[in-house]
Amino acid sequence: MQPCHNCRAIIDEYTLDKQLEPLRGLTADDFNVCADCATVVPDACVACDGAVYVPRSETSTPDYCPACRSDRIERTGRDPGWTAEHTS
């Protein structure tokens, strides 16, 4: 058991795994925060309509889920970041 990187509480992996279920195969092992510090927003990814993980420090909801962000990094070699670039 490890402490949450954000609040230092011990991470309850069962609770966090249940919360992360919509994030395409990610588990508590992929995060270093507790369930109270992880926010999952369903249907918010612009690429796959999957859930996104919103870091507590972020003030807006990311456009890409972690899996699509990772796919884009592998495919293009560039990190799109949390938010897509919108053209005006």
Image (tube, helix red, strand yellow):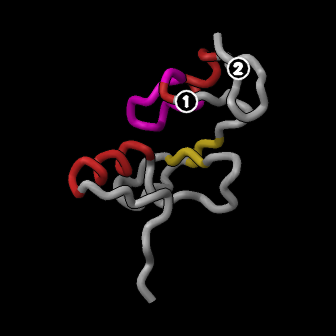
- Up the image or down, 53 lies above or below 27; here it is below
Q: Nearer the viewer, residue 25 or 9?
A: 9
Disc 2 target residue: 3
Q: Residue at x 39, y 60 (%)?
A: 80
Amino acid type at mark 2: Pro
Which region is colored magenta?
19-29
Q: Residue at x 74, y 32 (%)?
A: 36
Rendering coords of residue 76 (x, y %): 23, 57
Q: Secondary structure at mark 1?
A: loop
On the rendered structure, is 62 left or right of 39? left
The N terminus appears in which quarter of the rendering? top right
Q: Mark 2 or mark 1, which has the lower sequence index?
A: 2
Rendering coords of residue 78 (x, y %): 31, 58
On the rendered structure, is 38 left or right of 74? right
Q: Residue at x 64, y 20 (%)?
A: 15
Rendering coords of residue 60 (x, y %): 64, 62
Prevailing SS of the magenta stretch: loop
Q: Residue at x 54, y 23 (%)?
A: 28
The C terminus appears in which quarter of the rendering? bottom left
Rendering coords of residue 38 (x, y %): 65, 37
On the rendered structure, is 67 left or right of 43? left
Magenta span has 20?
yes
Amino acid type at mark 1: Phe
Q: Secondary structure at mark 2?
A: loop
Q: Which mark is residue 11?
A: none
Q: Which mark is residue 31?
A: 1
Q: Nearer the viewer, residue 20 or 11?
A: 11
Q: Quadrant of residue 85?
A: bottom left
- Up the image or down, 79 lies above or below 28; here it is below
Q: Quadrant of residue 18?
A: top right
